[in-house]
């Protein structure tokens, strides 16, 4: 945490408390309190994340909320061994998926280009790629949105995605790409120290 | 904006001002003031976004900061016609890219699994897919991070990605996937009304 506390924050438009809550102090959580997570809390997180921009306002992200013991067992069966106990321990697990049929909503979501829905209808490969790209960006919004709603997030991708899709999305055609465990962090929420990060100088080139 | 103002926000852990700044009132910006954007401001945004979780702490996102007139012209040449004037008008444009050579940093970033770097070295296809997936999620963090640093973001993907990669990333091997114009919004920052969004009930299924 030292680098958090010593980094200058004069340029920020949010307070240190917010910067810590959403980014600097937030951890990939695997240790939870007993406090439950309501659908209303998840909806509150969504009602922030939904405003994040997507290409042509396509909003292709879909969310399966895995809450019941029975549904948890169905999901656990398709998780990697190391992630099975994490799903079992979490108050609720979200399966994030991309909907290749997102274009069904475009007449409403993107009225600026009437006919886009019909144009995309035969282009299944294009739709699948668009759905995945934009749903992945939306996953970033969701993780920050959960934290802004007072929840902790534990994203994981060690799982059999095809198995999950067959288990839950055979009729909808949604394509899973991430599981996020959600709850309230017990302490820091992780038994591990935070990993280091790459600095701006390490990731950026200025022309 | 009506839905913003009438939606209950009792569950949030941040104030309405923060929720508006980061999500509810933020727009995909294409109209800018003359206020410049410094590298320090971009670094401040990165110093939030970098803390967002990625698989195995891989942090594959890379950023080309396109600021000079000459660099802008090189980028504009590869943008779709509708996006050329948007790049020209923005104080600075960021090319977001995924680095398939992210594994070079893993000994530092993910010391829990020594040898992961060597294991991934021959798996170029796996690395490219991992880089793209995680960099897309990081793009979500960056867009929120820019707003938290007091900047406005205008993401776009209508462009010739292969052309951009050849122009800028022939030696690094970075793979572009998004351009984000950055600056300070003039008014709302967009000439268009905000598009509608899908509600939690429309995107979520609870089991």
Image (cartoon, coloured by chain):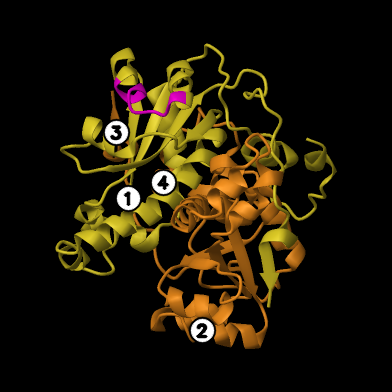
Chain colours: A yellow, B orange
The residues bearing labels 1 and 2 have C-alpha atoms spaced at a distance of: 28 Å
What residue span does the magenta drawing correspond to?
A74-81
Chain for numbered disc 4: A
| Residue with the mark numbered 2 | B76
SS at mark 1?
loop
Residue B149 visible? no
* Left or right of residue B168: residue B107: right
The residues bearing labels 3 and 1 have C-alpha atoms spaced at a distance of: 18 Å
Residue B30 point in image, percent of width and height: 50, 71
The crowd level at tag 4 (other Cα within 10 Å; few <14, some 14-19, many 20+) is many
SS at mark 4?
loop
Chain for numbered disc 1: A
Task: Look at 69% across and 45% down and name the residue there.
Answer: B107
Please tell me which of labels 4 and 3 falls first in the chain.
Answer: 4
The crowd level at tag 2 (other Cα within 10 Å; few <14, some 14-19, many 20+) is some
Quarter assignment of residue A119: bottom left
Closer to viewer: mark 4 or mark 3 = 3
| Residue with the mark numbered 3 | A164
Closer to viewer: mark 3 or mark 1 = 3
Q: Which mark is residue A20?
A: none
- In the image, are marks 4 and 1 on the same chain? yes
């Amino acid at each position: 945490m030292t680098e958090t506390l010593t980094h200058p924050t004069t340029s920020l438009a949010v307070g240190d408390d917010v910067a810590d809550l959403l980014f600097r102090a937030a951890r990939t959580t695997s240790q939870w309190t007993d406090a439950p997570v309501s659908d209303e809390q998840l909806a509150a997180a969504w009602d922030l994340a939904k405003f994040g921009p997507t290409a042509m306002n396509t909003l292709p992200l879909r969310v399966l909320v895995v809450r019941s013991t029975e549904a948890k067992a169905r999901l656990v069966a398709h998780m990697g061994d190391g992630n099975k106990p994490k799903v079992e321990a979490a108050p609720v697990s979200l399966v994030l998926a991309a909907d290749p049929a997102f274009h069904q909503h475009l007449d409403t979501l993107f009225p600026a280009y009437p006919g886009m829905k019909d144009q995309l209808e035969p282009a299944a490969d294009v739709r699948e790629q668009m759905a995945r790209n934009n749903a992945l960006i939306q996953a970033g919004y969701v993780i920050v949105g959960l934290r802004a709603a007072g929840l902790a997030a534990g994203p994981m991708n060690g799982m059999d995605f095809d198995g999950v899709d067959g288990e839950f999305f055979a009729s909808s055609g949604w394509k899973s790409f991430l599981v996020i465990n959600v709850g309230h962090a017990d302490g820091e929420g992780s038994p591990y120290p935070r990993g280091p990060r790459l600095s701006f100088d390490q990731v950026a080139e200025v022309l």
